[in-house]
Image (cartoon, rainbow, N blue to C red):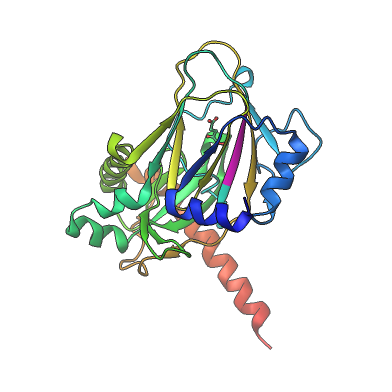
Amino acid sequence: MEAEQILSLLTQHLVLFFPDQSITPEEHIAFGRHFGQLEGHPNLRNPFSDQSEIFELAASSGGIADEWHSDITFRSQPSILAILHMVKCPEVGGDTMWTNAYKAYDELSPPLQELCEGLTALHDATPHGKPEEMTIHPVVRIHPVTKRKSLFVNEHFTRRIVELSHEESELLLGHLTRWMSSPRFTVRRRWSEGTVAMWDNRCTQHFVLNDFEGERIIQRVTVMGDIPEAASPPRWAPYARIRGGGATSRFDFQLNRFLGQQAKSLESNRKSDDP
Ligand SMILES: O=C(O)CCC(=O)C(=O)O
């Protein structure tokens, strides 16, 4: 099958499975390259290979992604798609689930859709021990190919809705991330060794069931990303109280820090553009 056909099936179905492949790491990388430039994982170690374009998640080294997420959303250009190869799986358990972020958006009530479209969210790499790696994305993004809207917040990397207070953000993010995982939006894969799975990272999230014993080894290549296009520009200013000292000001600390860094970098870009 041609790469273009595969991409078109992916656009239609969001997640594809190719059983009984048992590919080598080189074949895995070569397959991935058909879909764009590959990137290694920015924060996770790559213990099994010198090749930076492939990395491994092994249960023995704690590589169980048991929180819903899209990949690398703490970066300004999160990956567009990823391809997994199941190398060793437990006899029972360790299934992976994916959820459809288009449906999660489509089935929100119109007032909540409208609210979410005017919001942005701060994402960071806290799960990798790097909270200083952060960026802001729209809460609702538009897929560059289908032009459909999808919800783009996840429980693993999204810390805060920028235009809401900390307390309001906790409520809304809690609701949206639970909503994303509603069973009717999801598909669940029981793995066998040699299966390859591919997903569109712009309109899905995934989650691994941490319910198994024994080794589970899976390898991934990741196709580099694009800047998420917002369904609409943010409709409100960031809500972060500048004054310090109050017991709850710690909740605004990270957002203020990000906004400060952003203002500095805009200022230095402006200066370097000055004739
Ligand atoms: O191990 C899996 O099934 C999924 C791994 C994962 O979450 C990821 O590659 O981001």
* Residue lying at 52% horizontally and 25% vertically, measured from the top left: 191
* Residue lying at 28% horizontally and 38% vertically, measured from the top left: 184
Residue 63 sits in quarter: top right
Camera-side residue of 270 and 19? 19
Camera-side residue of 35 and 268? 35
Magenta: main secondary structure equals strand
Q: Position of residue 75 (x, y in %)?
A: 56, 52
* Residue lying at 50% horizontally and 42% vertically, measured from the top left: 16
Position of residue 240 relative to residue 274, above or below, is above
- In the image, the segment drawn in magenta is 82-86
Q: Residue furthest top?
A: 213
Q: Residue furthest bottom?
A: 275
Q: Position of residue 257 (x, y in %)?
A: 50, 53
Camera-side residue of 66 and 97? 97
Camera-side residue of 9 and 94? 9
Q: Is residue 235 magenta?
A: no
Position of residue 116 relative to residue 64, above or below, is below
Position of residue 260 relative to residue 124, above or below, is below
